Amino acid sequence: RWVCPGCGFYNRITNKWCGGNGHLGCKAMRSDSAEVVKPNILRPNAVPTIPEEARRYGDWNCPACGDYQFRRNPSCRTCGTLKPTEAPLDGLDPPPDPPRHGR
């Protein structure tokens, strides 16, 4: 991973442009001087970098490295830590039941 000098977002090492802060990201180009960070030294319990409106019920933050994970991920895509048994993000409500039609 590399850290965007413009917004501080942790990007995948293969990204040439920043994908952080907002719907399309800040789009700063990766420079040769961008700080490269190995997953095992990411700050524990880092603040998630996914915008609030993009978070969904069941998504979770890795307890080991703080990386934001989608509900479908059984383990952290950054460090491999297994998903905790109770992982929904605090403050997010479960989706409402679908409307029932008829009977």
Image (cartoon, grey):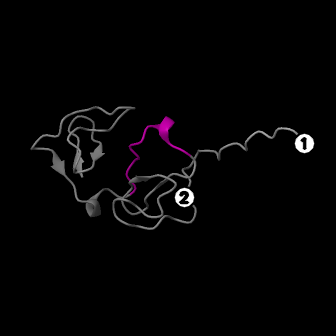
Part of the protein shown in magenta: 45-56
- Residue 90 location in percent, x, y? 56, 49
In the displayed structure image, the side of residue 103 where residue 69 appears, left or right: left
**Image quadrant of residue 98?**
top right
Q: Position of residue 80 (x, y in %)?
A: 37, 66
Residue at 23% x, 41% y is 4
Up/down of 53 relative to 60, above or below? above
Q: Name the kind of residue labelled 2 in the image.
A: Ala
Name the N-terminal-most of marks 2 and 1.
Answer: 2
Report the amino acid beneath label 1. Arg
Element on which disc 1 rests = loop
SS for callout 2? loop
Residue 87 sits in quarter: bottom right
For residue 60, side relative to residue 22 (left or right): right
**Prevailing SS of the magenta stretch:** loop
Residue 47 part of the magenta-drawn span:
yes
Tell me residue 46's x, y (percent).
37, 52
**Residue at coordinates 40% horizontally, 61% vertically from top-left?**
76
Give the residue at mark 2.
87
Report, in whole angstroms, how far the alpha carbon at label 2 lies from the one at label 1.
35 Å
For label 1, the residue is: 103
